[in-house]
Image: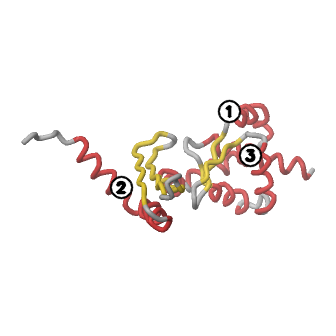
């Protein structure tokens, strides 16, 4: 029976990722599974590891958050075994995703990360996306890791303003002098 339970947890993860059009942060999925009493943190963490190792889900990690997406193999697995997931669980997932809709949008639409370059500087990448569609992407080469972290953190606060200003400036007609 324990193996069957773990398989149900894996199906829950696959089903949740299949129900949304955007990568989900790990915390959203863990929150559902743990707070609905399905299992504990360590068991769902192990199930995640199995799903990643089996390439049923894919991870996109930034310096402060990991996002997960369903792979084609994961989708095929869900199509084959999704009927093992009880209707009640699917209903709970649907209600949870509806309840957390704005939190999911907020956490998955603004993505920022940084990496060290060969030259010793840091490249901060900031993305505004709708689902998997990129609306705006900005990369800044900065001198220090501290600067890169500031750029990434400020992106969450300033992204809407920066996006609007860029659109106004870039879509305005050029007035030659």
Mark sitting earlier along the chain (1/2) = 1
> x%, y% of residue 158?
37, 61
Mark sitting earlier along the chain (2/3) = 3
In three-dimensional space, the C-alpha distance between marks 1 and 2, rounded to whole angstroms, equals 33 Å
> Which residue lies most toward the bottom here?
146
Label 1 element class: helix
In three-dimensional space, the C-alpha distance between marks 1 and 3, rounded to whole angstroms, equals 13 Å
Check contact, mark 2 vs mark 3: CB within 8 A.
Answer: no
In three-dimensional space, the C-alpha distance between marks 2 and 3, rounded to whole angstroms, equals 33 Å
Circle 3 packing at 10 Å, graded few (<14), some (14-19), many (20+), is some
Residue drawn at (90%, 49%) of the image = 3
Residue, disc 1: 72
Residue, disc 2: 160
Residue drawn at (48%, 58%) of the image = 121
Quarter of the image with the C terminus in it: top left
The circle on residue 52 is: 3
Label 2 element class: helix
Could one spot residue 129 in this view of the protein? Answer: yes
Q: Would residue 91 appear left or right of 43 to someone viewing this image?
A: left
Q: Would residue 166 appear left or right of 135 to someone viewing this image?
A: left
Which corner quadrant of the image does residue 26 belong to? Answer: bottom right
Could one spot residue 96 in this view of the protein? Answer: no
> x%, y% of residue 130?
46, 44
């Amino acid at each position: 029976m324990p193996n069957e339970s773990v398989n149900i947890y894996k199906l829950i993860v696959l089903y949740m990722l299949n129900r949304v059009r955007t990568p989900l942060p790990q915390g959203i999925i863990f929150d559902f599974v743990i707070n609905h009493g399905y299992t504990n943190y360590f068991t769902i963490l192990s199930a995640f590891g199995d799903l990643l190792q089996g390439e049923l889900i894919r991870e996109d990690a930034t310096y402060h958050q990991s996002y997960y997406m369903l792979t084609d193999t994961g989708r095929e697995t869900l199509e084959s075994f999704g009927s093992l997931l009880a209707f009640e669980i699917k209903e709970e997932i649907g209600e949870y995703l509806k309840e957390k809709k704005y939190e999911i949008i907020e956490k998955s639409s603004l993505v920022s990360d940084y990496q060290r370059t060969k030259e010793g500087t840091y490249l901060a990448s900031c993305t505004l996306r709708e689902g998997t569609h990129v609306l705006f992407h900005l990369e800044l080469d900065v001198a220090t890791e501290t600067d890169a972290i500031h750029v990434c953190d400020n992106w969450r606060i300033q992204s809407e303003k920066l996006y609007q200003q860029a659109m106004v400036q870039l879509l305005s007609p050029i007035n030659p002098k």
